[in-house]
Image (tube, rainbow, N blue to C red):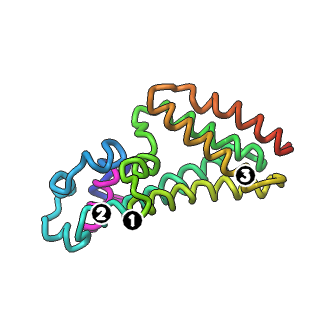
Amino acid sequence: MASEPMSGAGGVPLSARQRIIDTAYELFSREGLRAVGVDRIIDESGVARKTFYRHFPSKEDLILAFLEVRGQRWTHAWLEAEMQRLGDTPRERLLAAFDALDEWFRRADFESCSLIAAAFEVRDPGAPVHQAAVRELEGVRQVVLAAALAAGARDPESLAYQVQILMMGAIVSATRQDLEAARRAREMAELLLDHHQLR
């Protein structure tokens, strides 16, 4: 889910702010929040230090912007869209989440989940970064919940939590090189859907 940091659609130059965000997106996604410093982002985005701090007074401000963009790009532009593309019925769309994850895990640029990583890297529940990561993870659950509601699940809230737990577990397992993680999780998800009487 990486993006080209220096130019937008049709080769139109990106604004300094967008270059910073896109560069941070690439680096934070691949290497984590703590491992990437502001100096490196400034250098690789090609903006002046003063310009960087005009848009993002602190690294935390940039991380919060990154997490919001990650939610938009990963959760909605990719996962939700893939669920719609791969599944014709609500039940199929719930299972399609695991098919999408399976394709992602096998890509050379698979970089794990930045939302989960951020929640672990900043564990203080009162910290803005932790809260933002939790909020974006809730956005993922809302996508699953919408499919569960559309499928007529008898307890859609519970099902959404259960499916998301399987998704997050699969992502963590794939991070340790288990390329079959999504397929294994999909098998468990099918049992869950049967339990919730989704046909």
Task: Describe the element under mark 2 as helix, strand or loop.
Answer: helix
Seen from the viewer's position, the closer of residues 46 and 184 is 184
Q: Residue at x 51, y 62 (%)?
A: 135
Give the total number of marks visible in the rendering.
Answer: 3
| Residue indicated by mark 2 | 60
Q: Is residue 193 shown left or right of residue 14?
A: right
Task: Describe the element under mark 1 as helix, strand or loop.
Answer: helix
State whether residue 10 is above or below residue 181.
below
Question: Which tag is nearer the camera, tag 2 or tag 1?
Answer: 1
- CB under 8 Å between callouts 1 and 3? no
Image location of residue 10, percent across then percent down? 36, 59
Q: Is residue 68 shown left or right of residue 139?
A: left
Seen from the viewer's position, the closer of residues 148 and 89 is 148
Image location of residue 101, percent across then percent down? 56, 38
Looking at the rendering, which quadrant does residue 189 occupy? top right
Q: Is residue 7 shown left or right of residue 44?
A: right
State whether residue 177 is above or below residue 72.
above
Closer to the N terminus: mark 2 or mark 1?
2
Closer to the N terminus: mark 1 or mark 3?
1
Mark-to-mark CA distance, 2 and 3: 33 Å
Looking at the rendering, which quadrant does residue 92 occupy? top right
> Identity of the amino acid at label 3?
Ser
* Magenta-highlighted residues: 8-26
Q: Residue at x 18, y 51 (%)?
A: 40
| Residue indicated by mark 3 | 158
Image location of residue 31, percent across then percent down? 31, 42
Q: Is residue 34 magenta?
A: no
> Identity of the amino acid at label 1?
Pro
What's the mark number on residue 128?
A: 1
> Identity of the amino acid at label 2?
Glu
Q: Could you tell me what secondary structure mostly forms the magenta stretch?
A: helix
